[in-house]
Amino acid sequence: MKTKLLLLIAFVFTAININAQVSLIGAGATGSWSVDYNLSDADNDGIWNGTAVPMAGGEFKFRLNGAWETAWGNGNGAATWPTGIADTTPGVNNNIVAVAGVYDVSFNATTGAFSFTGGAPLPVVKLVGTSVTTSGGILMNLTGTGIYSITNTTLVAGNAQFDVDGQLAGGTTFPTGTAINSTDFITVPAAFYSTITINITTGEYSFVTIPPVSIVGDAVGGWPGSTGNPGPLDINQLTSTDGVNYKIDKLACTVGPAKFRQNNDWAVNWGNSAFPSGTGTPGGDNIAVSAAGTYDVTFNRVTGAYNFSFPTIALVGGATPTGWPTGAAGEVDATVLTTTDGVTYTVSNVALTASECKFRANNAWAVNWGNPAFPSGTATQNGNNIVVTTAGNYDITLNRVTGDYNFTTTMSVNQFGDTSFSLVPNPTKGMFTINADVTKVQIFNLTGQLVKSFNNAAANESLSISELNQGVYFAKVTDSNLNEKTIKLIKE
């Protein structure tokens, strides 16, 4: 028996190491949850190492082969640093929290033991000067060896210097140059900058400008100079990394006109009456937003093409019928939630097993939400997997703006007896009727809360739920013979 056990341990150990790759990932390691830092196992013994690894500071994990199927965090949520035992157990492999610094890393993929030694602190680098409106300066993030950056920031006309652990350095040229001494000041024009970088080893710096593009109008808060958009900078600024493709996510829109414009003034602007997509032309008509909702908006500054859309959101993971995404090109998630407003997403009667799952947008991992809490909680971007503790059929809701989600056990439409009640119209804008005399109608929300009731309603009598929010409800109908039936009711 002992020999067999040893052979099994050896087999598992070997399986982890053949063609394997262990990496660090997360804001606290590489500065991003989409970028891995690969460790090395030169001896093929399951001990993965890294030398002089810069850790940005904050939450991170170890993971295998660049995928989330096997990922290690702090076992039982223990906040251990710089040493500890990492765990892959669902629900307890919380993110490890690193202290910023440069470390030698050791990680045992078999036992989970990790250590970070050395710990030379990373410099604190800031952009300061009269061009910076942020009190104390703008903190710059480590984005490469010795390279610190700021992205998508607006500066006013003035001067700038770089502050490295309290030591100031500036230059005499713009937009690029070399910061050498504390008596030089970089003259900076007012602009929106996509990237500002400094190499603290060589002193080389760069300011990259992108023309700011915003969306204005009654549909998006107000025209320039109004209460909702007082200026001088327009409220709804789009972001860009190349000066061509711009976007703004979760933009709350009402019915009304809107337009894109550049540099927070009217010299350059684009419009076209088409909605939700079209091609804006310089000085063109206002975009006629015809349906209220919370949209993701894209705009191409070169072609004028624009689009207002709701992202596709799906539930994925081992708890779902189709499991985790494989990453294959063109893969489309199966358990898709639907929405009428771009905020509240729902899906009904999903069969789940006791395992893990997550929400993600647009069939990709760039935007995803999780939180171990079940059956309800508040999911966060790149949060831990939701741990489904009880298998069953569920109605599921997600608020894309707040991250609030809820899994409610599905109520069968015949749960209270096989009756002939029917409800029309369904979906409803606010008024509906029932095809029989009933003694009681109770309206429940997805959490089981009674939100409205009616007594002694006649057949085809109009009943109103106009004051209720859009979403999915359940109408429990009872007649004089105590026959009952629960009907799913959708309020548009």
Image: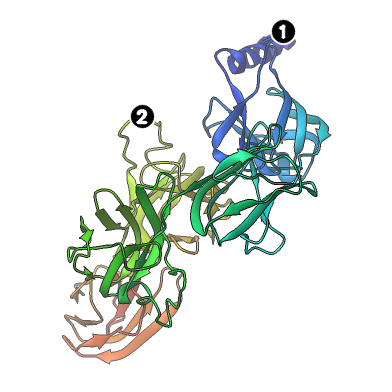
Q: Left or right: 301 with respect to 171? A: left
Q: Residue 328 carries which label?
A: 2
The answer to whether residue 205 shows anywhere in this view is no
- Identify the residue shown where x is 58% and y is 50%: 372
- Tell me where residue 243 appears, x and y as whole percent: 39, 47
Q: Quadrant of the N terminus?
A: top right
Q: Left or right: 184 with respect to 429? A: right
Q: Which of marks 1 and 2 is nearer the N terminus?
A: 1
Residue 120 position by quadrant: top right
- Tell me where residue 368 appears, x and y as whole percent: 47, 48
Disc 1 is placed on an element classified as helix
Q: What residue type is labelled 1?
A: Thr
Q: Quadrant of the C terminus?
A: bottom left
Q: Left or right: 434 with respect to 40? A: left
Disc 2 is placed on an element classified as loop
- Tell me where residue 287 appears, x and y as whole percent: 23, 67
Q: Distance between the residues labelled 1 and 2?
A: 40 Å
The answer to whether residue 190 shows anywhere in this view is yes
Q: Is residue 230 above or below residue 186?
A: below
Q: Residue 3 carries which label?
A: 1
- Identify the residue shown where x is 48% and y is 56%: 192
Q: Which amino acid does label 2 sit on?
A: Ala
Q: Is residue 261 above or below residue 87?
A: below
